[in-house]
Image: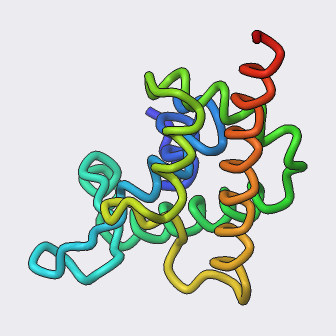
Amino acid sequence: MKLRSAIDDLHDNTVEALDGSLRRLEYFGGLRSREKEKKRDGEYEHWGLSRVHGDLPAMKALAQTHRSLVSQILATPIRLLLQDIDTSSALAGVAPVDYMEKLQLQNPDLNLLPPAPGAGSARHLNSVLQALSALAKSRIRSATRRAS
């Protein structure tokens, strides 16, 4: 059996199984704990990765991958992220507008940023999510006007 690093394992078995950058962001946000009784606030919880590689390597791999994912999203053109909304919302089984509302940092169960994000990352991500939400709503209004 070939030994693999925690980050390779995470990428090959988890990240690649999730379609859409926004869906991946949602997933990683869901792995971050907000309950202080369980672990320190903001630590990741991924039972399988921790079991195979240990807590510290798993936490490092999760944080590094999450940080990379946020950077990738912030560097992606809005038109491509709009297409991502369609994919991610369809896989989640909700309308694109509802999906975006969930991601707009309004959901207390999601922590979309990794620990110690880069300067301005929170504001940048929030503005990208707000723009995508507004564009998703705009598409609905445009489609309704065309249909009438």
Q: Residue at 33% of width from left, 65% of height from top?
A: 108
Q: Residue at 24% of width from left, 83% of height from top?
A: 40
On-image quarter of the C terminus: top right
Q: In the displayed structure, does residue 35 sit left or right of residue 25?
A: left
The percent position of residue 139, horizontal first and vertical second, equals 76, 31
The percent position of residue 110, horizontal first and vertical second, equals 39, 60
Specify the farthest residue to the front.
148
On-image quarter of the N terminus: top left
* Closer to the camera in the image, 13 or 112: 112
Q: In the displayed structure, does residue 12 sit left or right of residue 21?
A: left
Q: Residue at 33% of width from left, 74% of height from top?
A: 43
Specify the farthest residue to the top.
147
* Closer to the camera in the image, 63 or 138: 138
Q: Which color mode does the image show?
A: rainbow
The percent position of residue 62, horizontal first and vertical second, equals 48, 61
* Closer to the camera in the image, 84 or 99: 99
The percent position of residue 16, horizontal first and vertical second, equals 59, 33
Image position of 83 with respect to 108: above or below:
above
* Closer to the camera in the image, 125 or 137: 137
Specify the farthest residue to the left.
37
Q: How many marks?
A: 0
Q: Residue at 85% of width from left, 59% of height from top?
A: 75
